[in-house]
Image (spheres, rainbow, N blue to C red):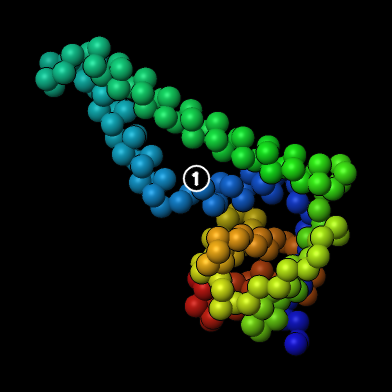
Amino acid sequence: MKVFFENQFIRTKDYYKEYYRGIYIKKPIILIFNIILSISFITNLVLMVFPKLGTQDSNTSLVNIATILIILCIQIYVYISNVNLEYNRELEKNKGNLSEIRALITEDSINVSTNLENNVNIEFKNIEKVIKTKNYYILLTKAKLGIAIKKDGFVKGTAKEFEKFLTENKFM
């Protein structure tokens, strides 16, 4: 098979931060949930400051605001924990070294290899969607495996050409 694109990068802690931000925090359901929480927070803040506008007392508003802040703190904690857990697993698994990722992209598949693991070959028919972040394209498979392609990591081809390839093949 002819290789159309080749991509290489090193998985750093910044990689894991952006990966989890793209996969979990920017998930539509999480965004909707956070918008609802934000509206509730503002509403309760207004009702606490101007209690005559609503039927609930300021103590109820204070409890609601505290609950919302706790929920947001839990989300932040889970995000930070996942980033640190995956990053530390990577270091432990690789005896303190970061993984160097190499992706070879052909017409119908992506072959991903690291400096320490065996190759993984994913056919494009198994790609469910593509999440575009600031520095990566994250290709999610039907089995929820995420394959990251770094935008400035192309050795063969360019990020624009790769995005055009994804668009033409209806992944974006």
Count of numbered badges drawn on the protein: 1
Residue type marked 1:
Ile
Q: Which residue is mark 1?
A: 25
Relative to the observer, which residue lies in front, 117 or 52?
A: 117
**Residue 41's x, y, as percent?**
32, 28
**Residue 159's x, y, as percent?**
66, 69
Q: Is residue 50 left or right of residue 30?
A: left
| Image quadrant assignment for residue 100 | bottom right
Q: Circle 1 sits in a helix, a strand or a loop, which is it?
A: helix
Relative to the observer, which residue lies in front, 50 or 22?
A: 22
Picture layout, residue 69 above or below residue 146: above
Looking at the image, can residue 154 be seen?
no
Q: Is residue 161 left or right of residue 76?
A: right
Picture layout, residue 147 above or below residue 20: below
| Residue at the (62%, 35%) spot, across then down | 81
| Residue at the (24%, 16%) spot, across then down | 60
**Residue 19's x, y, as percent?**
62, 51
| Image quadrant assignment for residue 67 | top left
Picture layout, residue 86 above or below residue 103: above
Looking at the image, can residue 47 be seen?
yes
**Residue 30's x, y, as percent?**
42, 45
Picture layout, residue 94 above or below residue 131: above
Query: Which part of the image, by quadrant, shows the N terminus?
Result: bottom right
